Image: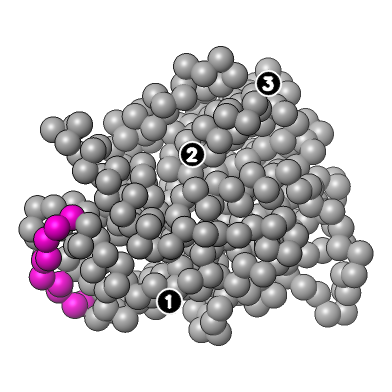
Amino acid sequence: MRILVTGTAGFIGSALAQRLLARGDEVYGIDNHNDYYDPSLKEARLARFADHPHYTHLRADLADAEAVNRAFAAFQPQRVVNLAAQAGVRYSLKNPQAYVQSNLVGFVNILEACRHGKIEHLVYASSSSVYGANRKMPFAIEDAVDHPVSLYAASKKANELMAHTYSHLYDLPTTGLRFFTVYGPWGRPDMSPMLFADRISRGEAIDVFNYGNHSRDFTYIDDIVEGVIRTLDHVAKPDEGYDALHPNPGTSSAPYRVYNIGNDQPVQLLRFIELMEQNLGRTVDKRLLPMQPGDVPDTWADVSALRRDVGYAPNTTIEEGVARFVAWYKEYVQRGE
């Protein structure tokens, strides 16, 4: 297939592009290479497949509607995966405008291009952050998500609402995936695995928020990519059993779906740090601090709907995943020295 993927210099986008190319798809990637974190990591990710004969890359911002429309007109994709976004909960407290431009304006431009391009299926990144102040565990797609605690979370909830509008008005099949704490080789340096690895390697103390009482549904990158591909291949259809008097937030009478994509195995943050220390061969002090604004205490994905509909089956244990991540980290850091 011809598949347009946004965010192909990013963590998940680059891993997805490689897998799609490996199975024989043509991939057109869009990324703006911004400096939210070190662009050299983005360039290094991209270098792994940029020369593939079935890959085309465009350096552009999704907020630039003309650039998006030109890309769709030139490539004429059959399906689209939108992973580009301004990420990060804490940064949304400092620079809210970046989230409006990328996650709202940029997403509308993608929706419009999909609508006019007669796209067969749009799969887009949502986030576990949409569960916000929810406390019922595990988080399920049937739960209401009306109390976000960061602008980032609100922007992702807005994406789901916008996608439903286009599914309803224009019969555009859309599927949103709520990602849960993705980690692994080539991960983002602003996320805890890389931050922890850096500090442990240097023998520096780690800041542990919520006094170490956090748990996260850490999900290994390979399991995430497998789930994205299975979802992309399973085009959203109207739910024949949808009851407008008792609506299910995860489905619709329109060709619309929302799923959790996680490991369904929450891990205490202190356990994750312990595994990092074991694999890096040293221990460090932990500074136990209060919870930060915008954070949530725990995440845990109910992935039963994704299992049922696409056969999603994450199988990477936290022990195995951390070992793989640290092995990559050592190699990458040594290569950069």
Mark 1 lies on residue: 298
Q: Is 283 contained in the magenta span?
A: yes
Main SS class of the magenta portion in the image: loop
Residue 181 image point, x, y percent: 44, 60
**Residue type beneath disc 3:** Phe
Q: Earlier in the sequence, mark 2 or mark 3?
A: 2
| Residue 95 visible to the viewer | no
The colour scheme used to paint the residues is: one colour
Mark 2 lies on residue: 15
Vertical side of 105 occupied by 14: above or below: above
| Residue 82 visible to the viewer | yes
Q: Which residues are magenta?
A: 280-289
Q: Nearer the viewer, residue 168 or 307?
A: 307
In terms of secondary structure, where does tag 1 sit? loop
Q: Residues within 10 Å of mark 2 (few under 14, many from 20)?
A: many
Q: CA distance from mark 1 to mark 3?
A: 41 Å
Q: CA distance from mark 2 to mark 1?
A: 26 Å
Q: CA distance from mark 2 to mark 3?
A: 21 Å
